[in-house]
Image (cartoon, rainbow, N blue to C red):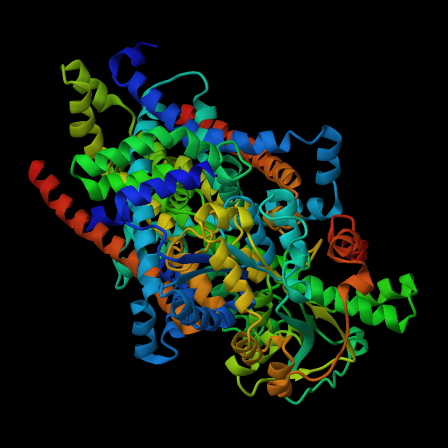
Amino acid sequence: MSQRSVTTESAVVRFLLIGAAVLVLSLFLLLPLAAVFVEAFRKGWEVFLASLHDEAAASAIKVTLLAAGISVPLNTLFGVSAAWLVTKFKFRGRSLLVSLIDLPFAVSPVIAGLVWVLLFGARGWFPQTAMADTFAPAARFTAWLAQHQGFGWLFSDFAIWLADPKIIFALPGIVIATTFVTFPFVARELIPLMESQGSDQEEAAVTLGASGWHVFFRVTLANIKWGLLYGVLLCNARAMGEFGAVSVVSGHIRGETNTLPLHVEVLYNEYQFSAAFACATLLAFLALVTLGMKSVVEHFTRHTSSDHK
Amino acid sequence: MKTFKLLTLLSSLLTSSIFADELLNVSYDPTREFYQEFNAAFAKQWKQQTGKALTVKQSHGGSGKQARSVIDGLSADVVTLALSGDIDAIAKQGNLLPADWQAKYPDHSSPYTSTIVFVVRKGNPKGIKDWGDLVQSGIKVITPNPKTSGGARWNYLAAWAYADHKFGGDQAKVKEYIRALYQNVPVLDTGARGSTTTFAQRGIGDVFLSWENEAHLIEKEFPGKTQIIIPSISILAEPPVAVVEKNAKKHGTEELAKAYLAYLYSAEAQDIAGKNFYRPRDAKALAKWSGNFPKINLVTIDKEFGGWGKAQKIHFEDGGTFDEIYKGR
Amino acid sequence: MSKRRVIPGFGLSMGFTITYLSLIILIPLAALFLKAARLSGAEWWAILTTPQVIAAAKLTFGASAAAATVSTVFGLLVTWVLVRYQFPGRKFLDAMVDLPFALPTAVAGITLTAIYAPNGWIGEYLAKWGIEAAYSPLGVFIALTFIGFPFVVRTLQPVMEDFGSEYEEAAATLGAGRWTVFWRVIFPMFIPALITGFTLAFARAIGEYGSVIFISGNLPLKTEILPLLVVGQLEQFKYEAAAVIAAAMLMASFALLFLINLLQRRLNWQNH
């Protein structure tokens, strides 16, 4: 009992702190969430379910999952690599690099979309027509492959894309815009964590003759797993919820290039408020699901790691 | 052209016909309900005529943003926007259609028109009757930001036209009126539908300057809460349509796109327009829905302001009169 | 220097990091700067010194700094409570922290406006006190705090969870009071993460668009934010002018980020 008192506060202080935190969270987070749910169910269950059953909604969910499914793993890979580089080594321009990694946060979503338009737009650096000419031989070759070598389903879609390589106002544009916006999340989560842990353990392992990959998987990964998990969750939540940048490059073609957040906007603009908020609750649910997964992983790993020790 | 050849080659090779009749209509915000109905009607007609199924894909957004998307490569076959200025930009900056596009269809290529009216709270508690009442102290006016919203520019110009007539063209007085008007605006949303929400859902403001069709939609969506006031003078808004020829050529949809827009002038389409609170050009449809469309003294942008290009430059560009009236507040 | 020799993977991680950074971030941003560079210095100056831009810059950076500061204070409190204490509903609240990410910013804006508008759940009471929450700079601040808050919590959380109690115990054994232990032992350990959280919240706030435009009211010179001016330029098909404002915003935020990162490095040096 006496040991407890030195590492925690008195009951009164604890109570006050918890109370304050709950108050802050309620005002800032629970109230908006409650508002979303109240709006979503204002017209009852049927409207709620019907709005999720809609064809356009299904397509929006698909696009959202695809975009997040591609951009999150890419950014995770980058995050680990960048954090390793920045925290394990000293080199010139390190501060500059860290600031550059942060940069996408400060880029307004409007601009994050605009840059891709400047690159791949009809009047940009790599317009679709120019790329179509460049890719034409590849398109013919892929079409030939599709006809003669099996995998027709795979190659024919690819051949069609190569013949008319759409980047913006199509799925690839949505993916790259999402990747841009969620770029720093994993790296930013890992850097302070690995910084505070130092590299003594890795150095010891290397001195004992372990290979680089071995050190990474056995030592580093075990130490950073929480930060990594938070980073991925954060990255994923943001990837699915991104609105501004995607709105610029999507073209808003209903049933084709609308993501879930864009679909919410569309519904809202059609005065279908309940349907709009129903789809918004879906995004909130996704956040809850990822958090639930986190708890499961947490529980599981706590178990195994205590076995280890 | 090259792309088109390669595409036809591929589609014949791969049998998966990517040219199952498909059309992309890039439009602005308040036309959703109208085009939903019109597309169904046209698809039915197209099927009868050609035996082919047709899917019309829709994209909606702010008029300027949509024009920008088309310029930057959104492959619209047809555009149906809020301002001729936006289609002019597609012609000028994107070179996607000829500069004389507006002469291709009757009535300046505007198959339906609209105007700006007032929406007030039920019973009109502040007794608002005309533009002059909007500048009284204590009146709160809701309108979007003319810098980001096409509809807001129509609002501004309608107010300007009123003042211009009232003060016999005295520029200083007109500007003073406009300044007083915008002093009464507590919120400038970025788009027309944002303003609708502010007025109807948030309950902010006493009067909302709105597209006529939006005003009717608000009455439908928020029954019993608002009523429409017709001012003594307003502006004739002509939302134009055009085939984006370069894109249609590439997709091989020229004939389809032309037929699609031409059908907007048919009796059936004009009827749908009237039903959705757009003023039909067709006299018969107009007569049928005349209950929705009270007579207003409407000025045109060409006569009053010398066309969109000029109006845009004088009023809305950086350093224009809109910026001027906000200076030194 | 010898450190570099010990741990492997410098070349690989450097190569991958730089390549990916260039492809996803640097080349696109270069396109932006090249677009802006088509205008002369005088034109830059003319665009950036209009009263609208100056007023919007003051609001954007001021409200972002204020929001990030408040987020950091609340973030520390909330993270501490979530990590250190057990109480009913803790897991649920923990999950809720990510809400601002998952909610599309437009929905966040609409929802916050619904709550803080004069006829909203909270706005009603604030209005009685004569406080205008929505459609004022305060509204901008509220939206930015909402957007930035999770950054602080999620940055601090893993650091706090990894933080063993040895130090506290040692300090306490040496006779230090709880308050002293917190400020002298615990708090300094969290400073790097807190600064990171602040930076992220701040940087994110500067660029935020979707949620702010609903709650701010967008009145010229009063509640217009910089990203809105960029959109305004685009509406006039002035890509170059839009790129100029965007580029200036970027340079300002980058300078700030760089300073904060330098500061953090300095603090880390002192800590070790």
Residue extending farthest to the bottom is: B123
Q: Position of residue A192 (x, y in %)?
A: 36, 34
Name the residue nearer the viewer: B329 or B192: B192
Between B59 and B148, the residue placed more toward the observer is: B59
Is residue A294 found left or right of A208 in the rendered image?
Answer: right
Quarter that holds the C terminus of chain B: bottom right
| Residue B300 in view (yes/no) | yes
Residue at 32%, 65% (x, y): give it. Answer: A55
C220 in relation to C259, above or below:
below
**Image point 78% across, 62% down: which residue?**
B302
Q: Residue furthest left?
A: A307
- Above-or-below relation of A91 to A49: above
C175 or C9: which is nearer to us?
C9
Residue B191 image position (x, y, % from top left):
59, 62
Vertical placement of B174 versus B15: above or below? below
Quarter-wise, where is residue A94 in the image?
Answer: top left
Where is residue B10, by image quadrant?
A: top left
Quarter of the view holding residue C162: top left
* Number of numbered tags placed on the structure image: 0
Residue C187 showing in the rendered view: no
The residue at the point 43 percent across, 38 percent down is B3
